[in-house]
Structure formats: structure tokens, C-alpha cells
Image: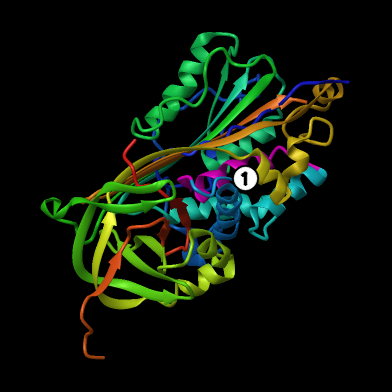
Amino acid sequence: MCTRSLRPLLAAAALLSAAAGCANAQDKPRIDTAGIKPMDTTPWVPGPSRLARGELAPDYAAFGLDLFQRLAQARPNENVVVSPLSAGLAVSMVANGATGSTRTGIERALSTGMEVDALNAANASLAAALRTDDVELAVANSLWARQGVPFQPSFMERNQQFYRAEVATLDFSSPEAARRINDWASRNTNGRITQMVEPPLDGDLILYLMNAVYFKGRWRDEFRAQATRPRTFHAPGGDVQRPMMSRTGSYGWMQGEGFQAVRLPYRGDRFAMYVLLPDTGQSLAQLRGRLTTDAWHGWMSRFSPREVALTMPKYRLNVESRLNQPLAAMGMADAFSPTAARFGAMLTAEYLARQNAYVGEAKQKVFIEVNEEGTEAAAVTGIEMRTTSMPPPPLAFTVDRPFVIAIRDDQTGTLLFVGQVTDPRTE
């Protein structure tokens, strides 16, 4: 049997995304005779949150922390930042095309405890729940299909219905195809991620699936630019001088075993950045070892107001991660196998009888900038398919050594970004 590849590309750009709500029956998207709906560039605004009716939404914490841990273990001295939300939504869309053990493995990797049908509805609810006026938050999805490949209309319909995915067919042999894909990534990350693919596209590529998340929030309490000055940061490769911001004020703070953490809220107090700093003499690896899903959820209830003299770096990072190996280790191995992958809910049986389809590559690009005003972050996830008491004095919290960051929606518990910063440089 000839094996071609259906290769997934997971990319995360410096954006936080607001997700899509479930379409009403009368809004069911129409599919043309080729099984693909032409690209619709009309912005979609999510409706009222369905979470208020008691429906469960995934927070992607278990999935995201596992993914981060595996990437950080492979690159312990590097900056590593991922978007669990972006990757989770992209993998969820791929799951709609999988069958049998391939689908079961994807569900296991996502760690939500939900089967695909329930997950689709939950993701739609989450997208609607993330809508807010406090920060800029946007989520977008797209599927780019090779002309002439017989995709199952139901696969496209489900991703349009639950994820509001934009869908288009392209001549992948044309240089224009790569330009359109990259333009979509740039447009949906406010220009922060401009290149996801390079021309010419591989001949065995049949589908390129992407999720983009964009986030921009201003601190509730901004830092004064005049107080920013160079200070020593103890990076793994040696001490470096980096611009450090300083501010004293009331923050959520907690002391854990071998580390302390501070909560920096954005305007509206719903979204916040969490900074986890190892104690002196403790390593970043020791902190990561304590960062389990259960521990994370427990820590979130332990923050209490303290007057904190906060000093932390100002930085801008661009991070790219290949996700094949960690996702396979988390349960998705079949999806990446040219022989074991089963995507019968994505492609017709006649097509798969001639050549199998599998995920060839998953990668994520992340941009994040932290400065005196706030934070901007973006993520694009793409998947390519190929065939085959009295107030105490201010507590000093000085972030002058490698640390862990997370950006979280404290209303839904959604983990938008998580990572480690070993050198807060500007790229």
C-alpha cells in the first residue's frame, strides 16, 4: 500500500483566542459539491455562555501541564512557552476525523475525560464563556484542504459547527497556497506570527489545520517605566543584564514547598499571570517536578493578599516547539503512524483503500511580550495531514532567576499559556 501523509501542524502565536459557540440548527453550514465550504472571513461573535447552564468546559490544565513538562524536560535550559488552549482546540478538531484506537488515543492525550462529541459541545461553550471586555481575547480556526481530495462532508461540517472553522480548498502546488495560509496566521495574531509554512508545500500534504489564539491585557496596576532599569538575572549560561520592572502593591501571594508565587491580575481581575519562583537553592527542575495537575488546582485556592515589593523582567520571546513526540507519548502515537492511523471520519473509504492518512507534523509557535503596561501573547496551532492580621511589611519578590509563568482565566479555570523563562531576553 502506498502511504501518503496527512500531517498536522500545531502552531501557537502570541494571541489568546475567544472560542466559538455551537451553531443553531438553522445555522448549519452548507457544504458545496466538493465537500468544502468557501472561506468565510466574516468575524464571528460568540453568544452568551452556556456554562451558566451547568455545562462542563475543559480547562486543558492537565493536557497543557503534561505537554509543557515534556517539552521542558527535553529543553531544560531554554525558554519554553506553550498554549494549552490553542493546542487543545487544534487536536480536538483533528479528533473529529479519527476513528477507533486513533480517536481513543487522541481523547486520552487531551486528558479532559470527554469523548469527542461531548468535547465539541464543551469547546463551543468554553469559546463563548471566554468572551470578555476586560482584555483583547480572540480565537480562530481554519482548515486548508488540497483540491481534489475527497474529504468527508461531515468532518468539515462538525468543525464549522462547533469550532467556526474557516474552510478553503487550495492548489497546494501553487506558491499562492503558502502565502494564503501565512496571511491567515498573521491576520489572526495581529501580525505577531507571520510564517507557518514555507513554499513549496510538500506533495503529500493534503490538509493543513490551524488554531490561532490572541491575548492582550493591561495590568490592573501598571509598572512605571521610569522605575525599569538593568539588573542581574542568573540565567543557566551565566549572569546577564536584563531590564527589570519594579512596583510595590497588593498582590495575591502564596508560599509553596520550595517556591513562592504571585498573581498579577489584568484589568477586570478575571485574567491573571501567575509567576512561580523557585526558592534560593532550589532549581527550576525541582519546581517543575512539583507542578502536577492536582498541585496546580490546589495552589490556585491558596493565594491571599499581601503587600509585595515586586521586581520582574521585561521581555519579548518567540518560541517554536515541535509537538509530535510529546503528543505521541501522551497517547496519540497511532495518529502519527503511517500504518496504524485511522482517519475514516475525515476521508472517504475509497480514498483510504489506496493510501492511508496520518498526522505528519504538529508544531506550535508562540509569541509573548511582557512590559510595564501588560502582556501580549499569541499562539497558532496547525496540523498537517499527509497520506499515509496587621499588615506585614512588603514582601520582596525578586524574579532574578529562571521561573515559571502561566496566564489563566480565573473564571473558567482555562489555562491559556504556560511555560518557563530561563533568560528573559528580547527577540
In the rendered image, residue 333, in percent from the top left (x then y), is placed at 75, 42
Of residues 327 and 380, the one nearer the viewer is 327
Looking at the picture, which amino acid does disc 1 mark?
A: Ser
Q: Which residues are magenta?
A: 78-99
Q: Residue at x 34, y 73 (%)?
A: 253
Instruction: Look at the picture and state if 218 lies above or below 43.
Output: below
Mark 1 crowdedness (10 Å alpha carbons): few <14, some 14-19, many ≥20: many
Q: Is residue 318 magenta?
A: no
Q: Residue at x 47, y 47 (%)?
A: 81
Residue 227 visible within the image: yes
Which quadrant would residue 382 be assigned to in this image? top right
In the rendered image, residue 310, in percent from the top left (x then y), is placed at 25, 65
Of residues 7 and 20, the one nearer the viewer is 7
Q: Quadrant of the C terminus?
A: top left
* Disc 1 target residue: 92
In the picture provided, is 99 more to the left or to the right than 225? Answer: right
Residue at the left extreme, as displayed = 226
